Image: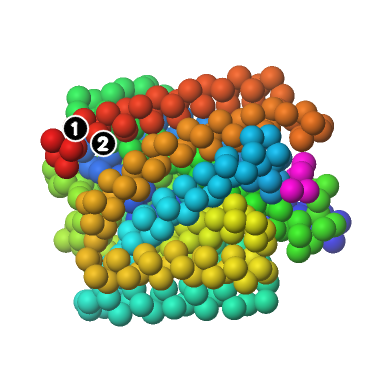
Amino acid sequence: MKNLKLPLYRWLGSLGPGIITAALVFGPSKLTITSKLGALYGYSLLWIVVVAIFFMAIFTSMATRIGVATEQSLLGSVKQKWGKWASLLMGGGVFLVTTSFQAGNSIGVGIAIGELYHTSAVPWIIVFNLIGISLLFFRSFYPVLEKIMIALIFIMLISFVTTFFWAKPDFSQIAKGFTTPAIPEGSQLLIIAFVASCFSIVGALYQSYLIQERIRIRPEIKNEKTDSVTGIVLLGVMCSIVIICAAAILHPKGISVNSATDMAKALEPIFGSGASTLFLIGLFGAAFSSLIGNASVGGTLLGDALGYGSSFNVKAVRFLVATVMIVGASIAIKFGKLPLELIVFAQSVTIFIVPFIGTALYFVANDAKIMGVRVNGIFVKIFAGIGLLLIFVLALVNFKELFFNNPLFK
């Protein structure tokens, strides 16, 4: 019996980095976008989840192999290939993006708990950011981060799966939504927003750092297989469930969704306060996991770019992670939402930095001198190349929307 359990334990232990990536990508904004997709277009856009998750899985597994294949960090490999300016651009860009969007995660946490207890969001924003910062004082931050993220993913799954069974969706329509691609009129911008956020190059990039942190703590697992795909599949499952729930509950009634809490409010008159409470707990899980994960990405990447290294044991890295949380919480408390100017700034940095990161990941993973036997095979080269093309197309579309269709620039 012990021998049968051992492979299962090893597999479960290998899920950590992929689960962390899934948890940090599935934040309040993702919950809002997926709810809107289902509320406005029913089941018809489920197919885009498959597309986004496929390319996310390709790039995440590529980053995983980079993390295992090299002793140096990904930014170290970027510096080796293209010079210090390239690593500073990537690290600084990621820090600016994560810091700019961090307020949204703080607001999500505050609103979720505030709605549950019918209080102001501000005290909860302060409390949970302090909890997030306090986690940095653990001697070994990564194992704590891994356990918390797995717990939060579990909470989200329970919340959304229970809502799924309450909703009693149409399974024939679900099957059609997954297998019959359709682009309803007026859905293009929402599709782009979903794919751009779900196919998260920054999340994939961070996977290489999580793998190396895990190996740093337990060197004996370096040659063991790390399952990065399961976590990304779970990300797709959660996105699909929220779309399906919104399609079954909100779409027939014509209820629109402008924020993640709108979905919870819509559930209460239909299924009672229990359903609303359960969904708000799922929103809290999404917000708190992104609050910690997003800050970890920004702090780690900037620390590495500045030459402090990427280990969570380094004080400078922990300080930078805390800085992301403090700035995000301060903006959330002062404005109660992300200021439009800050969103524009973050989007503009994202448009330019994401294609660069995707290109760097692709060419480092294709470099046999760096990767050795873990270099990209033909399948990954082809489909990661298509994914890279998709990244550039999304960047061009976002550039047009931001600078030519944005009222701030008219």
Residue at coordinates 27% horizontally, 76% vertically from top-left? Answer: 122
Q: In this orientation, which residue lies closer to the viewer: 165 or 64?
A: 64
Does the magenta portion include 274? no
Which quarter of the figure is the C terminus placed in? top left
Label 2 amino acid? Answer: Leu
Spatial separation of the CA atoms under disc 1 and disc 2: 6 Å
Residue 141 showing in the rendered view: no
Q: Which mark is residue 280?
A: none
Residue at coordinates 48% horizontally, 33% vertically from top-left? Answer: 355
Secondary structure mainly formed by the magenta segment? loop
In the drawing, does residue 288 fall left or right of residue 168? right
When the figure is inspected, residue 158 is found, relative to residue 349, above or below; the finding is: below
Contact between labelled residues 2 and 1, with CB atoms less than 8 Å apart: yes
Q: In this orientation, which residue lies closer to the viewer: 378 or 51?
A: 378
Numbered disc 2: secondary structure: helix
Q: Which range is magenta?
A: 68-72
Numbered disc 1: secondary structure: loop
Callout count: 2
In the drawing, does residue 101 fall left or right of residue 202? left
Q: Which mark is residue 402?
A: 2
Residue at coordinates 22% horizontally, 66% vertically from top-left? Answer: 335
Percent position of residue 9, x then y: 75, 58
Percent position of residue 165, x then y: 37, 52
Q: Which residue is mark 1?
A: 405
In the drawing, does residue 180 fall left or right of residue 225? left
When the figure is inspected, residue 333 is found, relative to residue 184, above or below; the finding is: below
Q: Residues within 10 Å of mark 1 (few under 14, many from 20)?
A: few
Percent position of residue 363, x then y: 64, 29
Residue at coordinates 57% horizontally, 73% vertically from top-left? Answer: 136
